[in-house]
Image (cartoon, rainbow, N blue to C red):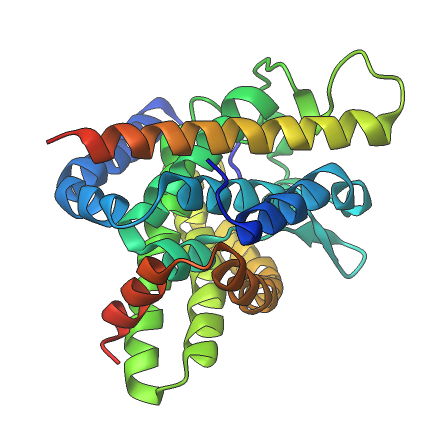
Amino acid sequence: MHIPNGFLDPVTASTTAALSSGTLVYGWNRLRREISQQPPTTLGLVAAFIFAAQMINYAIGHHTSGHMIGAMVAVVVCGPWAAGLVMAAVISIQSLFFHDGGTIALGANILNMAVIATAVSYTVYRTAAKKTNNRQLAMAAGAWLSVVIASAAAAIELAVSGTAPLAAVLPAMLKWHSLIGIGEAGITLFSAHYLIKYTKQKEMQMQVNGYVQK
Amino acid sequence: MFKSKNQLISLALILLIAGFLSNFASSHPDGLERVAEDLGFISQAAGHTSVLEDYSLPGIPHSGLAGGLAGILGCTLVFALVFSLSTVIKRLK
């Protein structure tokens, strides 16, 4: 759901950019604390994995395709604020070097996939894991909902820009992304297991446990 | 930088995904492109130029190789950015 240039009006583009930057300022201390708890190599590897995983589009029937966002994986492995930084870095490189997501729409894409998707993943995961005591289920729910809510945010931004009426673009985005989200949930369960196993960071495990307060 | 065997294994798996498996990605329009086509605003998409257009390294005739190398280059860029950002943020005090 990388929004290209031309879909957003200047006001929406700058508002979303301001919201994304504001989030960085607001969470700066927590971001710094999370980052200092884990080696830069781990964060870099998670970011590289998410970049690679986002290249793999999976077909949804004959009509469309989707690829993972990766916010839930990043949250589980790195913690929510570090995950935001990792996601924002991936989206920036995609936009600046690969023409995937517009440069003018960068603030909006970061807001949708690095801020909103991450916040939804973390909130759902933490709440569901506490309630059900089942981390796999919580992770799947967080991954699915992060895609759906991020797509709703993109739809609202498109509608506010006057690109498409909300009554048409919101249901259309929700329809496809509730299917794409199933793929996200599956890949998240699979890849979180291996990322935690192979990067083998005690700090991360601790952090995840800490967040779930197990 | 890569101290343990596990880190090397994960690095190898990531490069395998970006460099090889990416060739098997579906080329159907993604969710947003699908909606933009259906609702008729896809034509509003404006281009901006970038070096590695559509995940393909320029000047390489074999499309699979061009895509794989672009993927590996992208992973390297992302790793370098996050590694250096977090190193810098860590040292700030």
Q: Which quadrant holds residue B73?
A: top right
Q: Position of residue A58 (x, y in %)?
A: 72, 54
- Of the 4 image quadrants, the one containing the N terminus of chain A is top right
For image coordinates 56% across by 29% down, the residue present is B76
Left or right of B55? Residue B6 is left
Return the x and y of residue B59 as percentages of the image width and height. 80, 11
Residue farthest toward the right in the current orientation of the protein: B62
Residue A87 lies in quadrant: top left
Between A103 and A138, the one lying in front of the other is A138
The residue that appears at 34% across and 51% down in the rendered structure is A116
Q: Quadrant of the C terminus of chain A?
A: bottom left
User: In terms of image quadrants, where is residue A208?
Assistant: bottom left
Task: Specify whether residue A161 is in view.
Answer: no
Residue positioned 56% across, 59% down in the render: A177
Say above or below: B62 vs A209. above
Residue A115 drawn at (x, y percent): 33, 47
Residue sitting at x 35%, y 88%: A132
Extreme residue toward the left, this view: B93
